[in-house]
């Protein structure tokens, strides 16, 4: 089966040379003959508060949290030593654990995503050092 040959691609046309100035005119006249390019006018900076006043939308509806997050959970004895023994939602448990971590300065100084557990927190997370992302998984085992 024979295939048709494609036509060779066209080459770009050579760039045209600028026409030379008149030979009788002096060099300074040649410079004056070509108009100087004007700089584009600077754009005015947009005001920072432009978008805020123009959007007058109705106040957004407040989001209602999922019922699963707001269900009061009872902490285990080990977790109760850290956050207290009253039943509270998962969101509050997380807040209380972070308050405890900040109060006792348990966040690693070099790698801020790591938590250095003290004696009370070690009973919950079962490790001397744990990632903040793994910590929530370990804490959820201590909620009923």
Image (cartoon, helix red, strand yellow):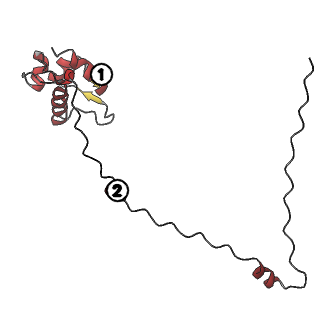
For the view shown, which residue lies furthest in the left direction? 86
Q: Which of marks 1 and 2 is nearer the N terminus?
A: 2
How many residues crowd around disc 1 within 10 Å: few (fewer than 14), some, or many (20 or more)?
few
Give the vertical position of 125 relative to 24 (above or below).
above
**Mark closer to the observer (1, 2):** 2
SS at mark 2 in the image: helix
C-alpha span from label 1 to label 2: 44 Å
**Picture residue at 43% right of the left edge, 62% below the top:** 46
The residue nearer to you, when weighing 105 against 7, is 7
- Residue 124, position as x, y percentages in the image: 19, 18
Q: To which residue does mark 2 refer?
A: 54
Dividing the picture into quadrants, the one containing residue 91 is top left
Q: To which residue does mark 1 refer?
A: 134
**Picture residue at 30% right of the left edge, 29% below the top:** 114
Quarter of the image for the N terminus: give it: top right
In the rendering, which numbered label is found on residue 39?
none
16 relative position to 51: left or right:
right
Quarter of the image for the C terminus: give it: top left
- Residue 26, position as x, y percentages in the image: 84, 85
**Picture residue at 30% right of the left edge, 52% below the top:** 56
30 relative position to 8: left or right:
left
52 relative position to 11: left or right:
left
How many residues crowd around disc 2 within 10 Å: few (fewer than 14), some, or many (20 or more)?
few
């Amino acid at each position: 089966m024979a295939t048709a040959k494609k036509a060779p691609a066209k080459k770009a046309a050579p760039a045209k040379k600028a026409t030379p100035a008149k030979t009788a005119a002096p060099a300074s006249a040649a410079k004056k003959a070509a108009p100087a390019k004007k700089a584009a006018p600077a754009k005015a900076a947009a005001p920072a508060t432009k978008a805020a006043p123009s959007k007058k939308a109705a106040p957004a509806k407040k989001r209602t949290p999922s019922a699963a997050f707001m269900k009061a959970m009872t902490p285990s004895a080990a977790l109760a030593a850290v956050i207290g023994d009253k039943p509270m939602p998962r969101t509050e448990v997380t807040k209380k654990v972070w308050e405890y971590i900040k109060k006792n300065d348990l966040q690693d100084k070099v790698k801020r995503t790591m938590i250095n557990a003290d004696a009370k927190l070690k009973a919950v997370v079962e490790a001397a050092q744990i990632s903040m992302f793994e910590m929530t998984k370990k804490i959820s085992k201590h909620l009923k």
